[in-house]
């Protein structure tokens, strides 16, 4: 059995090449085929940062990067660096003695792309492969590889061999385990043209070498769904994104189940069962990330690729693009705001059909179950579809404001639920309030409202203009009825007006988050020592600057989703700092 220390050193050594990719600031590598051009077609998960040093440079220009490296944080940043150095002093000395250079030199190792993928080469087993471009930093890389080789060669349950494929030597380490289902685990790597490739099998590395020049006819880059995703989620100026993520969830799940002996039976069952629910129509999901773009501090674009029109379970998640702007009653001091329009009746009908087909095995099974479940002794029966879901339009809005007091649960805000039948809606409200501590009728701005007290909290319920409003105070209710002055509404705030030009004409989902107001309370608690116990007092958070000095770095974020011919498309972005 390998010792814990040996396993830890082995894992750390193999992972260090990838980890330092996210902290390096090296000179950019020369152009070379991308990892997606060197991967076989069957890639079930893929994540890449095409140019790690450039991405790090761009991150430093974002609000978060400016916060971390800004002058306001200098005392705390220097304190943290000293704390880390003291904690790692012994490890740093040991690594420097082993490698012949300080660990800080590893930050110069990455010279381009860092990627990882879950793949299944033709005729092979599911596995993992990672790419790390190191450029001409052989003086840093070779001592690290030599140290890994020497440590593994001394382990009793590790067998070191090598194979040569297409003139490239692949080093293979077979590690014995105590699992009868997987008696050995292989870790392989090779170095070629300034790139380190680490994989879980020789077959995977062979498939990469076969495509090394990027000109192979069958590569992941040519995958139609991957191409579809990249075309939809391209950057503002058509340049390469700072990061790319892509996954085929169904194939990945089935691949994992089928690759483990104990779960192969379930994998075979799922392969035949999932199409009956339409799950196989989910073709892929991906996102691109762009930092320090022309109009954005950060922006991510994501796409869920689903066969259209949707079938099976996906028909239950139809979100309609009926929203065009933020409602007038949402105040500028909102910490967060959300809006969406969900086809509730469509969701119900889809679930009913699936239940009748695969569980009840006959039409009417779901209807019978629902009727029995909602039958009341007082005769006031409610049918979920006809009396509840049909009463609501599917539109929902909600805003919340950060509590001003000490109780974090005392959230101020308003929920707005669209309705189709005010009379039925009132009956549902009356039913829902049966257990409240007190319910009484009141008047706000000439409109009848319901004043409720329950669980020590007071709130107001009102039906107005085809909407049920649930709000925390009569003052908020007055804002709904009378409207807000322009200088007090979110839609007229500087934050929203800056983002408005980047929003579509209509959307099925929208969210707004004001990090400046949302972060303040916890930031001040951190600075005042409320969380010192988490670090046993070793970190002096009082060195953090006053919140007023750094609040500008906590920029608001916006997100929206729209339906497309390929599936739901989402953008989430933050805007540059306003000086």
Image (cartoon, rainbow, N blue to C red):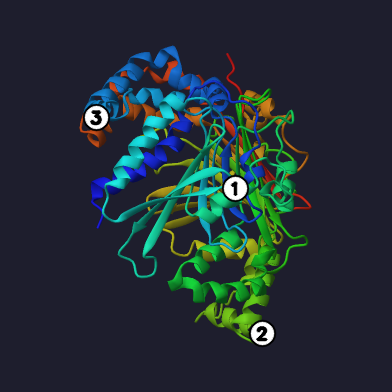
Question: Mark 2, residues whose alpha carbon is within 10 Å: few (<14), some, or many (≥20)?
Answer: some
Among numbered discs 2 and 3, the one appearing first in the sequence = 3
Numbered badge on residue 208: 1
Tag 2, which secondary structure?
Answer: loop
Does residue 16 lie above or below 372 as drawn? above
Residue 491, image quadrant: top right
Among numbered discs 2 and 1, the one appearing first in the sequence = 1
| Residue 197 at x, y percent in the picture | 51, 42
Specify the quadrant that holds the C terminus.
top right
The reply to whether dot 3 and dot 1 touch (C-beta < 8 Å) is no
Residue ID for mark 3: 94
| Residue 281 at x, y percent in the picture | 69, 63
Toward the viewer: 114 or 146? 146
Q: Is residue 496 left or right of residue 565?
A: left
Question: Mark 1, residues whose alpha carbon is within 10 Å: few (<14), some, or many (≥20)?
Answer: many
Please report the residue visible at 44 percent of the width from the left and 18 percent of the height from the top. Answer: 69
Tag 3, which secondary structure?
Answer: helix
Residue ID for mark 2: 364
Tag 1, which secondary structure?
Answer: helix
Please report the residue visible at 43 percent of the width from the left and 56 percent of the height from the top. Answer: 438
Toward the viewer: 448 or 381? 381
């Amino acid at each position: 059995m390998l010792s814990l220390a040996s396993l830890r050193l082995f894992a750390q050594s193999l992972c260090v090449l990838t980890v330092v990719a996210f902290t390096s600031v090296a000179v950019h590598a020369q152009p070379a085929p991308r990892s997606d051009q060197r991967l076989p077609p069957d890639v079930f998960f893929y994540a890449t940062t095409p140019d790690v040093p450039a991405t790090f440079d761009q991150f430093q220009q974002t609000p978060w990067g400016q916060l971390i490296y800004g002058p306001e944080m200098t005392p705390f940043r220097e304190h943290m660096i000293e704390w880390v150095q003291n904690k790692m002093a012994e490890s740093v000395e040991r690594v420097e003695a082993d490698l012949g250079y300080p660990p800080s030199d590893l930050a110069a190792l990455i010279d381009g792309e860092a990627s990882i993928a879950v793949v299944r080469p033709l005729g092979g087993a599911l596995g993992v492969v990672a790419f790390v471009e190191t450029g001409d930093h052989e003086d840093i890389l070779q001592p690290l590889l030599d140290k890994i080789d020497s440590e593994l060669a001394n382990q009793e349950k590790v067998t070191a061999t090598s194979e040569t494929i297409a003139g490239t030597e692949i080093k293979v380490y077979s590690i014995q385990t105590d699992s009868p289902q997987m008696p050995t685990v292989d870790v392989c790597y090779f170095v070629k043209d300034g790139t380190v490739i680490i994989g879980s099998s020789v077959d995977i590395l062979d498939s990469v070498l076969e495509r090394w020049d990027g000109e192979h006819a069958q590569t992941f880059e040519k995958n139609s769904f991957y191409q579809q995703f990249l075309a939809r989620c391209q950057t503002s100026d058509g340049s390469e994104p700072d990061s790319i993520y892509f996954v085929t969830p169904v194939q990945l799940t089935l691949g994992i189940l089928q690759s483990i002996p104990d779960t192969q039976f379930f994998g075979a069952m799922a392969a035949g069962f999932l199409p009956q629910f339409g799950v196989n129509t989910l073709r892929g999901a991906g996102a691109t990330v762009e930092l320090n773009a022309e109009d954005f501090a950060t922006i991510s674009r994501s796409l869920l690729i689903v066969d259209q029109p949707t079938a099976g379970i996906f028909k239950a998640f139809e979100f309609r693009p009926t929203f065009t702007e933020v409602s007038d009653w949402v105040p500028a001091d909102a910490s967060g705001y959300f809006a969406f329009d969900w086809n509730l009746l469509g969701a119900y009908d889809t679930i009913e059909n699936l239940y009748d087909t695969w569980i009840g095995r006959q039409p009417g099974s779901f209807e019978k179950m629902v009727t029995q479940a909602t039958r009341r002794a007082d005769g006031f029966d409610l049918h979920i579809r006809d009396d509840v879901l049909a009463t609501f339009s599917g539109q929902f809005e909600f805003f919340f404001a950060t509590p001003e007091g000490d109780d974090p649960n005392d959230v101020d805000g308003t929920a707005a639920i669209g309705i189709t039948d005010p009379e039925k809606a009132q009956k549902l409200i009356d039913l829902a309030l049966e257990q409240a501590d007190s319910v009484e009728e009141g008047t706000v701005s000439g409109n009848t409202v319901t004043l409720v007290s329950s669980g020590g909290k007071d709130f107001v319920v009102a039906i107005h203009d085809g909407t049920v409003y649930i709000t925390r105070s009569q003052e908020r209710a007055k804002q709904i009825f009378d409207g807000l002055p322009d200088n007090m509404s979110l839609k007229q705030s500087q934050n929203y007006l800056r983002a408005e030009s980047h929003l579509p004409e209509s959307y099925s989902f929208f969210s707004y988050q004001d990090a400046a107001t949302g972060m303040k309370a916890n930031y001040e608690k951190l600075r005042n020592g409320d969380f010192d116990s988490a670090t046993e007092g070793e970190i002096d958070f009082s060195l953090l600057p006053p919140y007023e000095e750094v609040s500008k770095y906590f920029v608001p974020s916006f997100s929206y989703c729209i339906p497309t011919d390929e599936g739901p498309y989402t953008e989430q972005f933050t805007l540059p700092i306003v000086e």
